[in-house]
Structures are given as structure tokens and as C-alpha cells.
Amino acid sequence: MAEYKSIIEAVKNAAKVCALEEYELYLTSSESIGCETFRDELSDFSSSKSASIYFRCIKNGKLGYATTQKIDEEEISLLVSRAAENALINEKNEEAIIYDGSGTYREIPKLDFELPSAARLADLAMDLRNVLYDSDKNIADGTAGGTGAYKGSTMIFNSKGLVLESEAGNASAYMYAVVSDDNGSSPESAFRSEYDLDNIDKKALAEYVINKAKSKFGAGNVKTGKYNIIFSRECMAEILSTYKSVFYADSAQKGFSKLGKSYVGKKIAADCVSLIDTPFRKDNPLKSAFDGEGYPTSEKYVIKDGVLSTMLYN
């Protein structure tokens, strides 16, 4: 937290000048690195570092917002004044709240992760490429892959004494295989995420993506009708990603969700269906004890045994 001390002091001083009693600072910073292969060579390399500051305040009962990616004392002073001005012209009637931090925060072990070097990522990317091509004689040109790593931090400070900080990071690898035979050509991809690149099983990943590609051979149209369908976990994740907004309370209140508040406590799915919001899952690389407004995160059932247990609120 020492690295943020000057930023916090600059915010406090600027808030006094603007006569702000309630305000909040949200700061994020991140570093990422990655490389990709195409056919038999490294095709792309990227490296980036970024930081953003979001500031919100309450003035005359209204919320004001401002953001910047420039971090110095002069810019922070301008940031605070812009937010104060924004509050004065805000016509929304939403309740203005700055969280006081009165909840209980789960302790998360300190992140032990460092970004790998560019050379290590490049070597792994080529290893992935070689393993993929060596795993099946029908691997065709157009096959690609890549590796990457990310590390980031979040800090929240507000006028009510709340000071929070979290870190996140992980490494990843993916394969995109094109498999061809007499039945035609079929592409497929697979992705793996780990804290340690050495834990990525290259051979198992190659076999998985090749088998998925081959499983599409011989596929065709089916007649219209009712069928029993088994969704793969990847397909189910895509479906949830598309329809997740139906569980947002804000969407329900505005009439944008099929699930209104009246559905809470009612059965909306089969008995075998449960959906859990679990920010502390062991293999989750983005664990955090708090959300974007500083409120403590917790594990909760959205659906339990087919029954809608709660909507998701900010």
C-alpha cells in the first residue's frame, strides 16, 4: 500500500479543495505479455502495461464520476474537480452510496506469481506447436497456438476509511488445430490456464484439441424435431456467458430480463441444475475478497436444485 500513499494524499487534498465529504478512488494496474505461433514459426509478440484511476464522489446528493489513465498529482487534482462538476449536472435519481467497509472480508493468500520472461513464453509456444504437429499426421497448415501471462492489482480507498488491495495473475496456453483427412477439414481450439507454466500438460492439451476436431468429421444436418441433448462444459459456459444478464437485478428491475424479482424462490430449472457464484474457487486465478465498490464478496447460490435463490446485485 506504500506505493499508493502519494496518490491517496493527492486525492484527499483535492477533495478538500472541492469541498467533498464523501468520495472513492478505484485504481487498477496491469501487465501482460504473450506470443503466438502460426504454422512453423513465431508470428506475433505483445507486451503491455497500463493503469487507470476511477474516482466518484457525492455532491448535493448526486454521484459524480471521472476517470484517467495519467497518474500524477496535477492530473489527480483535475480528476477530482471533473467528478465534482459531473455530480452537479447528473440528472439520474439513483441512490448515492459510498460503502463504509463494515462487512467481513475473507482472507486470500498473497499472490505468489511473477510474469515469465519473453524467452520462456516463446520457447513454450514453440514446444506447444511441435507437440501438436507431432501428435497426429493429419494436422494441417493453418494450425496455430500461443502463450501468455497477466498480472494485475486493484486498490480502493474512500473517505469513510476503507482501504483495500488485491492482486491477481496467471499464465495460459492455447492450441488451435486444423485436422484434415478424407472426411474434410475440421478446426478446433483449447485453452488452459495455470499459475505455473510448467503445470501445463502439452501432450494432453494436444490430444484433447485433436480429438475435439475429429469428433466433427461426418457431421451433418438433422431433421427438425425434439431431441435429448448433452451440452459439453465448454458449450454450457458459452450459453451462460450469453445469458448471464438475466440474473442481474438491475436488468430485471428495468424489464430487460425474463426473470423478474417475483421469480426468486421459484423453480426455473431441473432439479439437477445449480449455479454458484464462487469467487474463492481454488483454481480461480482472479480471486478477490471485494467487488468493484469495495463490498465483501461471498459464495452464493444463484440457482440451487433448480430454484432461483437470488439475483445478482451491485
Image (cartoon, helix red, strand yellow):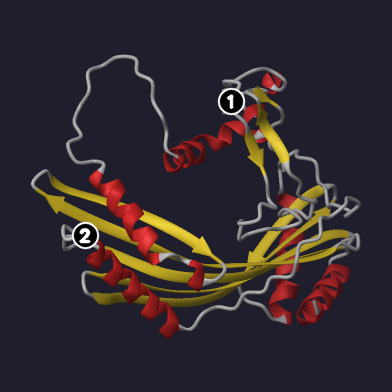
**Residue 102 x/y as whole percent:** 91, 52
Location of the N terminus (image quadrant): bottom right
- Image-based side of 258 in relation to 305, left or right: left
Regarding residue 313, the answer to whether it shows in the image is: no
* Name of the residue lying farthest toward the left: 182
Query: Which residue corresponds to the image point at 60% horizontal and 25% vertical from the top-left?
Result: 255
- Report how far apart the C-alphas of labels 2 and 1 lie in the structure: 38 Å
Q: Secondary structure at mark 2?
A: loop
Q: Is 75 located above or below residue 22 in the figure?
A: below
Query: Which residue corresponds to the image point at 76% horizontal and 55% vertical from the top-left?
Result: 290
Regarding residue 51, the answer to whether it shows in the image is: yes
Which is more toward the observer, 103 or 250? 103
Disc on the earlier residue, 2 or 1: 2
- Image-based side of 44 in relation to 234, left or right: left
Q: Amino acid at mark 1?
A: Cys
> Which residue in the structure is indicated by mark 1?
272
Location of the C terminus (image quadrant): top right
Q: Tags 2 and 1 in contact by the CB under 8 Å rule?
A: no
Q: Where, by quadrant of the figure, is residue 119 drawn? A: bottom left
Which is more toward the observer, 13 or 239? 239
**Residue 267 x/y as whole percent:** 64, 18
Q: Residues within 10 Å of mark 2 (few under 14, many from 20)?
A: few
> Which residue in the structure is indicated by mark 2?
136
Q: Where, by quadrant of the figure, is residue 54 drawn? A: bottom right
Q: Amino acid at mark 2?
A: Asp
Q: Where, by quadrant of the figure, is residue 164 drawn? A: bottom right
Q: Residues within 10 Å of mark 1 (few under 14, many from 20)?
A: few
* Name of the residue lying farthest toward the top: 225
